Image: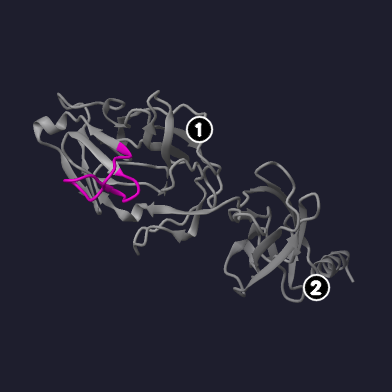
């Protein structure tokens, strides 16, 4: 037997019938402590890839899992016949982690006719995730962007009710203003420009046209009643729990947030209203505030908005959560107990 054939035989014997890939994962919670007995799920392909990464012989998938030890470490062994695989982590009492896509460097090779497949790619990957605890999820009102509520289209000051998720009369069925949308647009005086994209109505400006705003100009704002307000935080990066457990009563609650002009994607000559809360952010709102005779807050409601939040044409937010219990700062929503009973636009993010 030639040295080349002996080498290939050795590679095959080391490759067939055993788990040659390993994923090492470190799992901690939101306080940085190890998560014990968490399950790392790995999904992979058992396809045999031909020369050059062409068509595969089969299209089957496999699953493997491993559990974290006392130090939050887990190793998952599996036999991935292609270079790509995915994984996520779940544990009792925690929100599930995001899914992660991985790709081994190199490629599997099939050497005809008698040697089947030889793996020439790397065999290890390492990762680390943070799981967020389920502390005290409560029933609340939660809505997604599918509610698709039209915004007023003329200059003015308009109240919006986060519990009912609608404008105050005469523009909607809201009862209490949790915030106000203030429009101060120069195009209204000229009576233009209107465009329709999909199901959203936009009032747009042409960049550089005389008398029209420019990029960055302030043409409106979100504002709040006295002693009410909001602050903006950065999302956690975890889709299953992206924001905060509670409203921070020690933060400064701002009463006004500007709305500025931004470009409309690739259509650089057109300008539209920018978001108040950007993608990757969240806003915590304090509203419906009642004070004693000395001006001290004795009652308030708290809510949160996941960005991005836009008001051009329609109220557009990833998700809004309103806690109806006064003085309860908890913002951990239980998706199984949504107080909003509509079939469309029901919130699902804690």
Residue 329 x, y percent position in the rendering:
50, 41
What residue does disc 1 label?
249
Label 1–label 2 contact, CB within 8 A: no
What residue does disc 2 label?
17
Given residues 268 and 90, the one toward you in this image is 90
Q: Is residue 292 left or right of residue 334?
A: left
| Label 1 to label 2: alpha-carbon separation | 59 Å
Residue furthest out toward the front: 293
Q: Quadrant of residue 279?
A: top left
Main secondary structure of the magenta stretch: loop
> Residue, x 29% and y 27% (percent of image)?
215
Over which residues does the magenta segment extend?
A: 161-179
Q: Is residue 251 left or right of residue 60?
A: left
> Residue, x 27% and y 49% (percent of image)?
166
Question: Is residue 176 inside the magenta stretch?
Answer: yes
Secondary structure of residue under mark 1: loop
Mark closer to the chain start, 1 or 2: 2
Secondary structure of residue under mark 2: loop
Is residue 10 positioned above or below 169 on the image? below
Q: Quadrant of residue 296?
A: top left
Question: Is residue 109 inside the magenta stretch?
Answer: no
Given residues 101 and 299, the one toward you in this image is 299
Q: Is residue 176 left or right of residue 49?
A: left
Residue 67 x, y percent position in the rendering:
75, 60
In the image, which is nearer the foreground, mark 1 or mark 2? 1
Residue 253 x, y percent position in the rendering:
43, 29
């Amino acid at each position: 037997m030639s040295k080349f054939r002996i080498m290939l035989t050795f590679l095959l014997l080391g490759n067939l019938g055993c788990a040659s890939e390993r994923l090492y994962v470190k799992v901690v919670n939101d306080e940085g402590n190890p998560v014990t007995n968490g399950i790392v799920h790995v999904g992979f392909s058992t396809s045999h890839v031909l020369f050059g990464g062409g068509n595969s012989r089969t299209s089957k998938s496999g699953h493997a899992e491993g559990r974290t030890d006392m130090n939050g470490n887990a190793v998952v062994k599996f036999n991935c016949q292609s270079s790509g695989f995915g994984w996520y982590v779940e544990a009792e009492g925690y929100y599930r982690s995001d899914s992660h896509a991985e790709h081994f460097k190199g490629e599997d090779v099939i050497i005809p006719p008698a040697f089947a497949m030889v793996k020439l790619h790397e065999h290890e990957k390492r990762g680390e995730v943070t799981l967020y605890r389920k502390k005290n999820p409560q029933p609340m009102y939660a809505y997604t962007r599918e509610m698709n509520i039209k915004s007023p289209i003329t200059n003015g000051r308009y109240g919006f009710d986060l519990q009912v998720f609608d404008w105050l009369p005469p523009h909607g069925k809201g009862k209490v203003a949790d915030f106000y949308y203030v429009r101060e647009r120069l195009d209204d005086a000229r009576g233009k420009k209107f465009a329709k994209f999909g199901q959203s109505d936009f009032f747009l400006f042409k960049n550089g046209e005389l008398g029209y705003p420019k990029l960055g100009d302030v043409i409106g704002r979100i504002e709040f009643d006295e002693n009410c307000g909001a602050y903006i935080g950065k999302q956690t990066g975890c889709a299953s729990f992206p924001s905060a457990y509670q409203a921070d009563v020690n933060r400064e609650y701002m009463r006004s947030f500007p709305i500025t002009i931004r470009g409309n994607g690739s259509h650089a000559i057109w300008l539209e209203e920018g978001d108040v809360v950007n993608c990757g952010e969240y806003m915590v709102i304090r509203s419906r505030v009642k004070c004693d005779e000395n001006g001290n807050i004795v009652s308030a409601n708290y809510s949160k908005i996941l960005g991005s939040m836009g008001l051009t044409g329609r109220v557009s937010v990833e998700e809004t959560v309103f806690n109806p219990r006064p003085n309860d700062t908890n913002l951990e929503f239980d998706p199984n107990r949504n107080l909003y009973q509509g079939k469309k636009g029901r919130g699902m993010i804690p």
